[in-house]
Amino acid sequence: MLAPLLYHQGEPLGVEEVDLDPPKEGEVLVRMVASGVCHSCLHAADGTWAGVPTPMVLGDEGAGVVEAIGPAVRSVAPGDHVVLSWAPSCGACRYCVTGRPQLCERRPPPYHLADGTTRLRWRGQPVYHYGYVASFGPMSVVPESCVVPISRAMPLEKAALIGCSVMTGAGAVLNTARVPAGASLAVFGAGGIGLNAIQGGELVGAWPIIAVDTVDSKLEFARGFGASHVVNGQREDPVAAIQQRTGRGADYTVVAVGHAGAMRQAYDATAPGGTCVVIGIPPSGTTLALEAHTIAAREKRLVGSLYGSASVKADFPRMVELYLSGKLKIDQLITHRYGIDGVNEAFRALAAGEVARGLIVF
């Protein structure tokens, strides 16, 4: 198949003919319909996240149709419509059985499948799978636990975004923070994940919902997803602005950008007794400094959120139902569509803040 290939970090991707082996035991072959272009893939490509092996097929957010299944696969059959999850789970470890499969202790080694190998090859050498699913390729072999069947009423182009940005952003509000109606919410970063955190706040009736970013176009996107107030962090102090609008700070803050400075601002903007939820992952080696006494003296909570604390087998179909009922905005997230030869332009537009979400359509 032809697929965009990351040769080396920091270099443009090229479209190459890549060989794809059939699924082995416990694996599923999916014909991709669409894949979102995620910041995590951009960080892997541009070298922000160090140590990503190459060559690699990127992509961790996609949806498609099951083409074939390997031995012992029971949960899906050829023809099923599925959303891909980048978080394989064993179903039996402590975290899986207590409802936190995103923290599975028996996950395969990164960038490989369960047997420690890959199903992709280029010029005879192994090609790594990003996020276990490599959704930038038109076909992908993935672990059975990474495919979630969904209703055929759900358009697969739109369903692709549930696989990462929708679940990660909305889940941070719905699952991790469990924001109650009437609580104030501030979201730092109005990219694809931040916009979904904002609409998660709208779903639960948070008020006010304050979006913080440094790009005016992204703040305009935020208004369309439910932000009642916006703050441009280059023109005003976000902490002071949030305190002024809420009187004491936000009850809940969400950091949807991988920047330690934004994390510190969000924590400082959190009201006493409030919760700061961190989604974004900064560059390797980054540290975060806080005034330690504020944790106890002001009863502030600083918590992480991985994949929106989702149990994907239940939460992906829930997101589908919210979309089909008109309560979850996904169409509005998609601001540009690309073919596989447009990946470098998709990354450029993402880095420049020109899109809410770019989508590769096969």
Image (cartoon, rainbow, N blue to C red):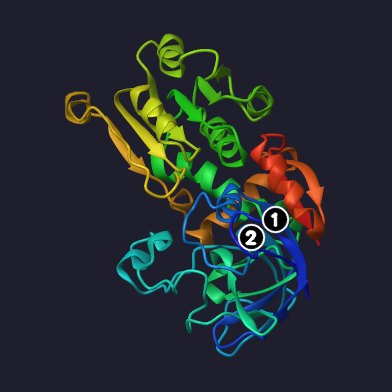
Other residues around mark 1 within 10 Å, as few (<14) / some (14–19) / many (≥20): some
Question: On the image, which quarter does residue 150 sit in?
Answer: bottom right
Which one is in front, 103 or 44?
44
* Residue for point 68% across, 53% down: 36
Sequence-earlier tag: 2 or 1: 1
Task: Name above or below for residue 147 compared with residue 155.
Answer: below
Q: Residue 12, labelled with which disc? A: 1
Judged left or right of residue 181, residue 72 is right
Q: Residue 59, labelled with which disc? A: 2
Is residue 42 something that shows in the picture?
yes
What amino acid type should be assigned to the residue bearing mark 1? Pro
| Quadrant of the frame with the C terminus | bottom right
Task: Name above or below for residue 257 compared with residue 181.
Answer: below
Instruction: Measuring from the top left, give residue 14's x and y in whole percent.
Output: 75, 63
Instruction: Measuring from the top left, give residue 187's x and y in whole percent.
Output: 50, 30
**Foreground label between 2 and 1:** 1
Instruction: Measuring from the top left, give residue 162's x and y in whole percent.
Output: 62, 52
The Cα–Cα distance between marks 2 and 1, rounded to whole angstroms, is 15 Å
Which one is in front, 81 or 256?
256
Judged left or right of residue 315, residue 252 is left
Q: Are marks 2 and 1 in contact (CB under 8 Å)?
A: no
Other residues around mark 2 within 10 Å, as few (<14) / some (14–19) / many (≥20): many
What amino acid type should be assigned to the residue bearing mark 2? Gly
The residue furthest bottom is 71
Instruction: Measuring from the top left, give residue 218's x and y in whole percent.
Output: 65, 28
Q: Secondary structure at mark 2?
A: loop
Which one is in front, 76 or 108?
108
Q: Residue 43, labelled with which disc? A: none
Which one is in front, 30 or 353?
353
| Quadrant of the frame with the N terminus | bottom right
